[in-house]
Image (cartoon, helix red, strand yellow):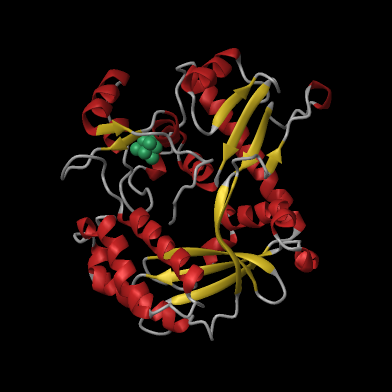
């Protein structure tokens, strides 16, 4: 889509979605995207409309509220623990007990992680004791004497102030047949910003079920890490001190991979450096614009009730399980879909790319 229809603009003004708005002042749509939002759209546009436009979440079969997701909850929990670790691991007061036992149990309990104990992976990990063991292993392998990274900062959120532009429309005089009439900004959160002696680089934690073959291979084509490097190049000059001025260009990211299952051989922790050239970052930028073009076109179609594309290859394989909206999509008509949504789903606040969000896996 090049020019948004008036129906689309009216819808955006009325719906008040957190990731898209219409700026009267600029006379254009403004999107704040993140990797989670766009990868959800790419996986299935119909899913995207249910999730990021209407806000439906599947009701839990076991009690009030929405269905819990082990992968998501475990990722959030592990990120919390890593944030805590890298804030305190070099301090004299740091102890394995307070980190991996006291604090880990507190967070495990607060998040109600025992509700996941029927999940195969949670059982294999050994529930909370297994989780504490994993953290102890991590803190021993990457204890202060072994950890070569100098942590500059943890949990850097970006996006709120539109500090990472992907595309800013130059107005009618600069019209390009390729790009949408919208401004696009990237949002996200970097787990750790570190100095490895040569580079200033972000480090991103990824929890995985287990290491199969080369566990790093999937990240070579993943837009998430590329987006972090792209963002760092925009924000680094503003956040690092002048003595590190020569390291202001960011071209590397470190993937910190964690296997929930203890592998038969080797460590359950692996680190993969990924290098991103300027050409790769520009290609990334163009891809995000292309995705937003398609997204706006589908949103326009949705707004006009013209139907939205479905990727039926994902219905039974949404990240290794059935799609949450399968019950809706297999209904025979729109009224049956609505009835299914009303009875089996709950509306929650829409994913907010500008807020500090947790997502992993
Ligand atoms: S059930 Fe299939 S078509 Fe429907 S939202 Fe899920 S993946 Fe898309």
Residue 281: percent from the left, percent from the top?
A: 71, 53
Q: Nearer the viewer, residue 245 or 347?
A: 245
Regarding ligand 1, which quadrant of the image does it lie in?
top left
Q: Is residue 59 visible?
A: yes
Tell which residue pokes out farthest to the right in this image: 173
Q: Residue 345 occupies which quadrant of the picture?
A: top left
Q: Residue 336 occupies which quadrant of the picture?
A: top left
Query: At 27% across and 28% down in the image, what residue appears?
Result: 341
Residue 355: percent from the left, percent from the top?
A: 50, 42
Query: At 61% across and 55% down in the image, what residue appears?
Result: 228
Q: Nearer the viewer, residue 336 or 137?
A: 137
Q: Is residue 335 above or below residue 211?
A: above
Question: Which quadrant is home to the N terminus?
Answer: top right
Query: At 75% across and 28% down in the image, what residue appears?
Result: 177
Residue 160: percent from the left, percent from the top?
A: 59, 41
Q: Is residue 332 visible?
A: no
- Counting the numbered discs, the total is 0
Q: Nearer the viewer, residue 64 or 312?
A: 64
Residue 313: percent from the left, percent from the top?
A: 40, 44
Query: At 47% across and 64% down in the image, what residue appears?
Result: 83
């Amino acid at each position: 889509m090049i020019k948004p229809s008036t129906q689309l603009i009216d819808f955006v003004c009325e719906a008040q979605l957190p990731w898209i708005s219409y700026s009267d002042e600029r006379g254009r749509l403004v999107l704040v995207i993140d990797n989670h939002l766009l990868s959800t759209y790419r996986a299935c546009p119909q899913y995207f409309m249910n999730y990021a436009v209407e806000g439906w979440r599947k009701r839990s079969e076991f009690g009030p509220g929405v269905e819990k997701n082990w992968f998501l909850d475990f990722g959030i929990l592990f990120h919390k623990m890593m944030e805590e670790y890298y804030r305190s691991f070099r301090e004299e007061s740091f102890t394995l007990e307070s980190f991996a036992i006291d604090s880990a149990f507190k967070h495990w309990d607060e998040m109600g992680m025992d509700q996941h104990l029927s999940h195969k992976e949670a059982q294999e990990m050994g529930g909370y004791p297994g989780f504490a063991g994993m953290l102890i292993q991590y803190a021993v392998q990457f204890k202060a004497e072994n950890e070569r990274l100098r942590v500059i900062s943890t949990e850097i959120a970006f996006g709120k102030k539109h500090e990472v532009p992907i595309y800013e429309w130059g107005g009618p005089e600069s019209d390009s047949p390729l790009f949408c009439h919208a401004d696009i900004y990237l949002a996200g959160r970097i787990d750790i910003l570190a100095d490895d002696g040569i580079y200033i680089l972000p480090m991103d934690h990824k929890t995985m079920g287990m290491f199969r073959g080369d566990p790093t291979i999937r990240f070579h084509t993943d837009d998430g890490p590329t987006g972090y490097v792209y963002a760092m190049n925009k924000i680094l000059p503003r956040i690092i001190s002048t003595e590190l001025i020569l390291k202001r260009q960011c071209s590397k990211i470190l993937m910190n991979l964690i296997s929930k299952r203890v592998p038969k051989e080797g460590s359950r922790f692996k680190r993969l450096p990924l290098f991103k050239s300027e050409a790769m970052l520009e290609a990334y930028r163009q891809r995000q614009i292309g995705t937003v073009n398609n997204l706006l076109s589908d949103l326009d179609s949705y707004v006009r009730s013209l139907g939205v594309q479905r990727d039926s290859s994902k219905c039974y394989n949404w990240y290794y399980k059935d799609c949450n909206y399968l019950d809706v999509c297999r209904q025979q008509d729109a009224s049956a879909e609505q009835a299914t949504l009303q009875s089996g789903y709950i509306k929650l606040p829409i994913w907010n790319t500008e807020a500090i969000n947790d997502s992993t896996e």
